[in-house]
Image (cartoon, grey):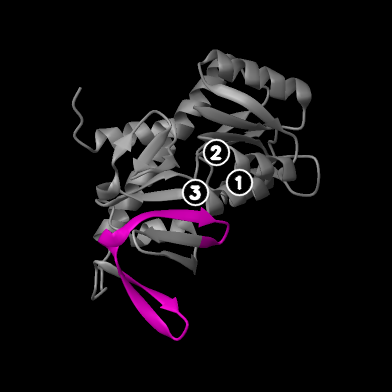
Amino acid sequence: MNILIVEDDFIIAKHLQFLLNGFGYEAHDIATDYPTAVELLANKVFHLAVLDINLNGYQTGIDLADYIRENLGIPFLFLSAHDDIAVVNAALQSAPHAFLQKPFQKITVYTAVKLALKNYRLAALAGETEMQEKEDTTVIKDALFIKEKHMFTKIMLSDILYIRSDDNYLELHTNKKKYTIRETLKNMIQQLPVNFFFRVHKSFIINLNSITAIDYVHVMINDIEIPITNDNRNELLSRIKTFS
């Protein structure tokens, strides 16, 4: 499991890195400011972020937490030496999955990481349940309508092989054609039936019925290799019938 450390104090960052790697995690990346952290998040897959509230520059760890929540949807915890109630309340608005107070010890780091991952899973399950309980007033439930020029073209959900994110645009790939729409992957996955579509990577949603093979780092759809994270692979395998 990859963990991103965002901390502008080198000694604290290296100590935290040493502890996390000692627990068996992969904490190889350290960012000292908001821009560096965003660049790392855009180019690598992380399963957890540890964010210092105070960072170099005018953008804080709270700003970074808001970015993660809105664009990536991965768990994060705050690292802080603050005892200022106003600062703590501001941080809580970002809905962190745990807090780690400085100075930290080995056991408090271990506990904070486990708590963050657990709270993230519980929040995800609660969100799925809430979505399922909401009344669905959609008339046509097995198709999407994509605007092309002056009309909306009907695309059957069963025809979608996979969806790829490109910043604020999505590519919907079918056997016949690729459609491009202005939407985020986070919003799209909420519109799709969870029994048929699965998010395997921060940039990809796949149609489960289109899978032709799965290896350790890819899902195959025909001859197309789509990356999958280790955690998502384990979850995917738990949802399908496999035989050895």
- The span picked out in magenta is 144-169
Q: Main secondary structure of the magenta part?
A: strand
Q: Which percent across, then down, holds residue 151?
A: 40, 84
Q: Please say whether residue 142 is one of the residues in the magenta stretch.
A: no
Closer to us: 25 or 76: 25
Question: Helix, strand or loop at disc 1?
Answer: helix
Q: Are marks 3 and 2 in contact (CB under 8 Å)?
A: no
Q: Which percent across, then down, holds residue 234?
A: 34, 31
Q: Residue furthest right?
A: 57
Q: Residue furthest bottom?
A: 150
Closer to us: 74 or 156: 156
Instruction: Give the residue number, with chain letter if any, for mark 2.
Output: 76
Instruction: Give the residue number, with chain letter if any, for mark 1.
Output: 65
Instruction: Give the residue number, with chain letter if any, for mark 3.
Output: 203
Position of residue 203 in the picture relative to residue 40 (left or right): left
Closer to us: 52 or 216: 216
Say which residue appears at 53% left-offset and 34% top-offset.
Answer: 48
Compute the Cα span from label 3 to label 1.
Answer: 19 Å
Q: Which percent across, then down, holds residue 158?
A: 26, 60
Question: Helix, strand or loop at disc 2?
Answer: strand
